[in-house]
Image (tube, rainbow, N blue to C red):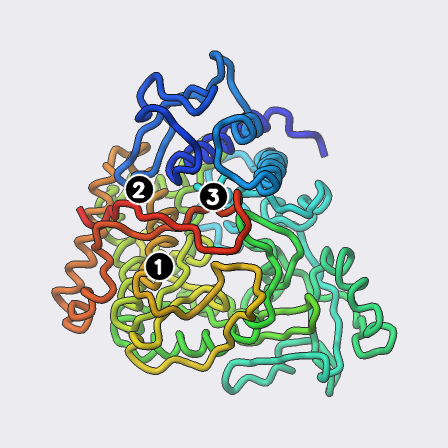
């Protein structure tokens, strides 16, 4: 490996831009001025505009001090940023890790255009550009350079889990209705199979479970099949049998705002939530027959405390028709090494407006319908969505990652929900909960993830590259939703409850969250672009 000298500069500029833009939007830094020339944040000069997408801040020129360029570390540590000192230092380290990790990834990018028909498993590696708002979008704290090369999706490595089997008395097992877990895991009869990520085995599992390993209550079976990491890093897709379930394994690293472990209660909730959502979709003609939504169920969860766990999830391959291809939603704003968007041939063939209408109908409307009619919000950020298309025409959406990615109020569900395990009182993540009595938190949970980062980035790309104004993008999405209300009385009747057209939406302050202890929700109200 050669050090990616030429890539550090462009990555540092991206990290700085996302840091400054998010700090300004979240009112986490003292700024004098409105973004026009002469605007300052302490000793730093900056210019920016606010866009029609939630008033998102976009830099319009370089950030400088006395006319000289600055680094993310300099701005974070010397600008008037409101932060806990220890958390500020932590974020500074995460930003430096992001610069290194993304520079390595950019160096590994292949030349030539991105092929939208390459297949979603391949595109998981080619379009792993990271979060488009969070400045520490590839922090991966805990991984060294060798780990990045061996275990992250940009390098398309082959990963073989370490296979353990456990005495059932050590384990908690929750499976999808009718599933025999022994058909999924690898273990002798009477034992529970549990795969372990090789990095986790090396750094944590062997040490923390030495007594169980010594007694035989936990045994090493061998090396597992060949897998490839998906965008989340901890989810591995089977290479030799693509239709086999993928497996999500805990990693004691932090990426963006979140530790990448698996909380035991979420593992136990995975299959019940998946069965519930699949049942809702199957029983609703709009979702099952018209939208043909694909629910990639989490069919089995296993935990061995402390720190061991696995969630098996259905593969998308078995749900695609022969003429269909799939693109992970992050790929919709990805560019080739020479800057050409992956969706370029689609937009040139269909036009930005027509393609946006198809996208909204295929991917946005089912999620809003699920919220309004059934009272269930999904954490629909780009990593949890896959667009199914036919020759670039959006057809339908595949949804995934439900174990800690739903929110609802039981009083507002259209039908009774499943019994689920609540987070323990000492759960370290204040943002991790499934149930609330606040309907705005339910609505905001969907629209924050779906619109604030996910769709807003698509709107931005269509504006900058194809001249399709962001206001027009949101107007098309809103018209699709309003048209659905005209056709579906049950949807229209509940729009007043789950008001997706409210003047403002509650959005999480993602960067602020890294600047303070994670003990409370940190949110703010932003103008809703669907309102216009």
- Left or right, residue 361 beside residue 200: left
Q: Position of residue 432 (x, y in %)?
A: 49, 62
Q: Pointer 2 and pointer 1: residues touching (CB < 8 Å)? A: no
Tell me, yes or no, if residue 104 can be seen here.
Answer: no
Residue 350 vs residue 461, the one in the foreground: 461
Residue 225 vs residue 409, the one in the foreground: 409
The residue tagged 3 is 512
Q: Position of residue 41 (x, y in %)?
A: 43, 25
Q: CA distance from mark 3 to mark 1?
A: 20 Å
Q: Position of residue 153 (x, y in %)?
A: 59, 49
The residue tagged 1 is 446
Residue 41 vs residue 134, the one in the foreground: 41
Q: Earlier in the sequence, mark 2 or mark 1?
A: 1
Above or below 67: residue 357 = below
Q: Residue at x 59, y 85 (%)?
A: 180
The residue tagged 2 is 459
Tell me, yes or no, if residue 199 can be seen here.
Answer: yes
Q: Quadrant of residue 62?
A: top left
Q: Earlier in the sequence, mark 2 or mark 3?
A: 2
């Amino acid at each position: 490996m050669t050090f990616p000298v030429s890539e550090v500069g462009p990555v540092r500029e991206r990290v700085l831009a996302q840091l400054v833009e998010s700090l300004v939007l979240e009112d986490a830094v003292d700024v004098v001025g409105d973004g026009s020339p002469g605007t300052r944040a302490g000793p730093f000069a900056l210019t920016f505009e606010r866009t029609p997408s939630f008033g998102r801040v976009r830099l319009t020129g370089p950030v400088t001090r006395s006319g000289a360029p600055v680094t993310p570390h300099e701005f974070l540590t010397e600008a008037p940023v409101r932060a806990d000192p220890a958390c500020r230092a932590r974020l500074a380290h995460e930003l430096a890790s992001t610069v290194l990790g993304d520079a390595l990834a950019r160096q590994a990018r292949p030349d030539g255009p991105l092929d939208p028909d390459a297949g979603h498993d391949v595109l998981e590696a080619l379009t792993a550009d990271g979060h488009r708002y969070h400045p520490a979008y590839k922090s991966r704290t805990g991984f060294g350079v060798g780990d990045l090369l061996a275990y992250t999706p940009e390098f398309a490595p082959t990963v073989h889990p370490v296979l353990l089997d456990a005495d059932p008395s050590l384990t908690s097992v929750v499976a999808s209705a009718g599933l025999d877990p022994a058909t999924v895991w690898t273990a002798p009869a009477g034992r529970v199979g549990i795969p372990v990520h090789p990095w986790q085995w090396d750094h944590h599992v062997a040490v923390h479970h030495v007594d169980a390993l010594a007694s035989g209550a936990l045994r090493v079976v061998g090396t597992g099949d060949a897998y490839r990491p998906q965008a989340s890093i901890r989810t591995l897709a089977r290479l030799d049998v693509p239709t086999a379930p993928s497996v999500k394994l805990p990693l004691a690293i932090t990426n963006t705002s979140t530790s990448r472990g698996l909380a035991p209660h979420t593992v136990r909730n995975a299959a019940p939530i998946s069965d519930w959502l699949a049942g809702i979709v199957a029983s609703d003609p709009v979702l099952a027959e018209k939208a043909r939504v694909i629910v990639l169920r989490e069919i089995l969860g296993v935990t061995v405390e402390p720190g061991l766990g696995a969630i098996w999830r259905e593969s998308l391959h078995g749900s695609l028709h022969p003429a269909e291809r799939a693109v992970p939603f992050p790929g919709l704003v990805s560019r080739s090494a020479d800057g050409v968007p992956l969706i370029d041939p689609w937009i040139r063939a269909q036009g930005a407006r027509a393609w946006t209408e198809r996208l909204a109908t295929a991917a946005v409307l089912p999620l809003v319908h699920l919220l309004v009619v059934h009272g269930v919000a999904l954490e629909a950020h780009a990593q949890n969505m896959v667009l199914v298309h036919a020759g670039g025409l959006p057809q339908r959406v595949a949804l995934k990652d439900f174990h800690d990615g739903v929110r609802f109020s039981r009083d507002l569900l259209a039908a009774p929900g499943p019994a689920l395990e609540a987070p323990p009182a000492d759960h370290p993540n204040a943002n991790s909960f499934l149930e609330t009595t606040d309907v705005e938190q339910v609505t905001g949970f969907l629209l924050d993830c779906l619109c604030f980062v996910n769709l807003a980035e698509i709107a931005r790309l269509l504006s900058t590259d194809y001249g399709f104004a962001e206001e027009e993008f949101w107007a098309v999405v809103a018209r699709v939703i309003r048209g659905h209300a005209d056709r579906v009385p049950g949807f229209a009747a509940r729009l007043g409850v789950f008001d997706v057209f409210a003047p403002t939406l509650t959005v999480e302050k993602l960067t602020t969250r890294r600047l303070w202890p994670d003990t409370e929700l940190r949110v703010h109200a932003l103008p809703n672009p669907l309102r216009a």
